[in-house]
Image (cartoon, rainbow, N blue to C red):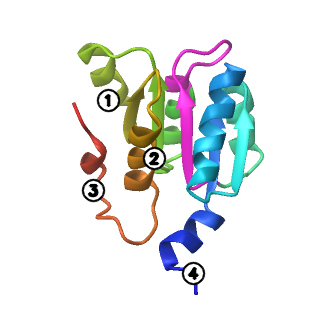
């Protein structure tokens, strides 16, 4: 019998938004290693936002901050404007305290700095992805 958490990850729907193809592939591969089978990708914020406008449902968004056309914070603002509380992990090279505070004020759930360390990335995903076992406290995802 499959434990409930593992079963949930098989069914979890994740949107990954990243304009760098190598980074996109790395993130998708990491997600697959923890058993997430439903991963949708977008190469920029406009494509990501179109997914939401078309009514697609996701359990988690993992998004690069710096992208052409629409950056990660704009994607997040649009999602939050629709009153969605979907967990949102922002991935970026911006690691200044001011940048992080700005992202927090926009409603991100977690922040991961590039270059991505697989173990840290998995840990953050496991903490923020709603699986029925977490505390639901978004602040638990923060590590400054």
* First reached walking from the N terminus: tag 1 or tag 2: 1
User: Which mark is drawn over residue 2?
Assistant: 4
Is there CB contact under 8 Å for labels 3 and 4?
Answer: no
Q: Residues within 10 Å of mark 2 (few under 14, many from 20)?
A: some
* First reached walking from the N terminus: tag 2 or tag 4: 4
The residue stretch that appears in magenta: 58-74
Quarter of the rendering occupied by the N terminus: bottom right
User: Is residue 92 among the parts visible in the rendering?
Assistant: yes
Q: Is residue 26 within the magenta segment? A: no
Is there CB contact under 8 Å for labels 2 and 4?
Answer: no
What residue sits right under mark 1 in the picture? 105
User: Is residue 107 among the parts visible in the rendering?
Assistant: no
Q: Is residue 78 left or right of residue 45?
A: left
Disc 3 or disc 1, which is closer to the eye? 3
* First reached walking from the N terminus: tag 3 or tag 4: 4
Q: CA distance from mark 1 to mark 4?
A: 38 Å
Q: Residues within 10 Å of mark 1 (few under 14, many from 20)?
A: few
Disc 1 or disc 2, which is closer to the eye? 2
Q: CA distance from mark 1 to mark 2?
A: 24 Å
Disc 3 or disc 2, which is closer to the eye? 2
Residue found 28% across the figure and 64% down from its top:
135
Secondary structure at badge 1 equals: helix
Residue found 47% across the figure and 38% down from its top:
118
What residue sits right under mark 3 in the picture? 137
């Amino acid at each position: 019998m499959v434990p409930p958490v593992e079963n949930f990850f098989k069914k979890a729907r994740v949107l990954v938004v990243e304009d760098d193809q190598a980074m996109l592939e790395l993130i998708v591969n990491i997600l697959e290693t923890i058993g997430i089978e439903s991963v949708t990708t977008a190469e920029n914020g406009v494509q990501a936002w179109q997914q939401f406008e078309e009514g697609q449902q996701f359990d988690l968004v993992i998004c690069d901050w710096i992208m052409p056309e629409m950056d990660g914070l704009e994607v997040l603002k649009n999602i939050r404007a629709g009153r969605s509380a979907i967990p949102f992990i922002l991935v970026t090279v911006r690691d200044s305290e001011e940048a992080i505070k700005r992202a927090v004020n926009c409603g991100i759930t977690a922040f991961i700095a590039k270059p991505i360390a697989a173990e840290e990335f998995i840990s953050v995903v496991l903490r923020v992805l709603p699986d029925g076992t977490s505390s639901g406290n978004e602040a638990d995802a923060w590590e400054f």
